Amino acid sequence: MNSSLIPISIHKVLQSQTYTIVVLGSKETQFAIYMEPHVGKEIQHYLARSKNLRPSSHDLIQNILAGSDLKPLQIVISDVEESIYFAKLFLEKKEGDVRTVLEIDARPSDCLVLALLSNARMFCEKRVIEKALPYE
């Protein structure tokens, strides 16, 4: 594993009508990402292991990936600029003995939901934690 990657998890989800705050981090430090309320509700559903009445867009994406034999391997919160976070989704495809990993730029909010859906590992670049405002 890349030594600049720090394993992270979701510590808290705070919901309002206009935005959601997702607190991420390691045991040592935490930071907050703001996102749309509907994505925050999706994250809360998956954390609570409750079932949606209808499939969400993230369920659709997960089903398309599974149907294409692509598996979310990990997500990485890769950068932050002026409180805007960037992420990468790493997808794995195995065909016989050949393993291919695809790296896709994506919103952190979508990456987090897909990671929860697929039990993919979650990481953050060390430089992001160093640049992010700590959440206390």
Image (cartoon, rainbow, N blue to C red):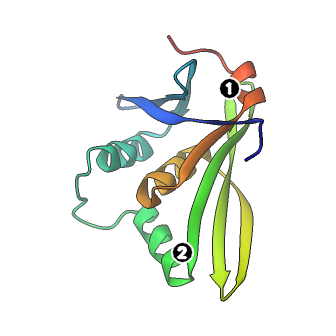
- What residue sits 37% from the left and 63% below the top? 56
Camera-nearest residue between 100 and 24: 100
Residue 2 on image: x %, y %: 77, 44
- Residue 99 or residue 85, whichever sits in front: 99
Give x and y (percent) for residue 75.
62, 50
Label of residue 65 in the image: 2
Q: 81 or 30: nearer the eye?
A: 30
**Residue 20 in view (yes/no):** no
**SS at mark 1 in the image:** loop
The answer to whether 113 is drawn above or below residue 73 in the figure is above
Which numbered circle lies on residue 83? Answer: 1
On the image, which quarter does residue 99 sit in? Answer: bottom right
The amino acid beneath tag 1 is Ser
* Residue at the limit of the structure toward the bottom, as seen here: 96
Going from N to C along the chain, the mark reached first, 2 or 1, is: 2
Q: Residue at x 77, y 37 (%)?
A: 3
Q: Say the numbered circle drawn on residue 112.
A: none
To which quarter of the image does residue 128 belong?
Answer: top right
Quarter residue 16 falls in: top left
Element assignment for label 2: helix
| Residue 110 position within the rendered picture, expressed as x and y whole percent measured from the top left | 54, 52
- Who is closer to the viewer here, 106 or 11? 11
- 33 in relation to 90, above or below: above
Of badges 2 and 1, the one in the foreground is 2
Q: Is residue 16 left or right of residue 76?
A: left
Q: Residues within 10 Å of mark 1 (few under 14, many from 20)?
A: few
* Up-down relation of residue 7 to residue 97 (above or below): above
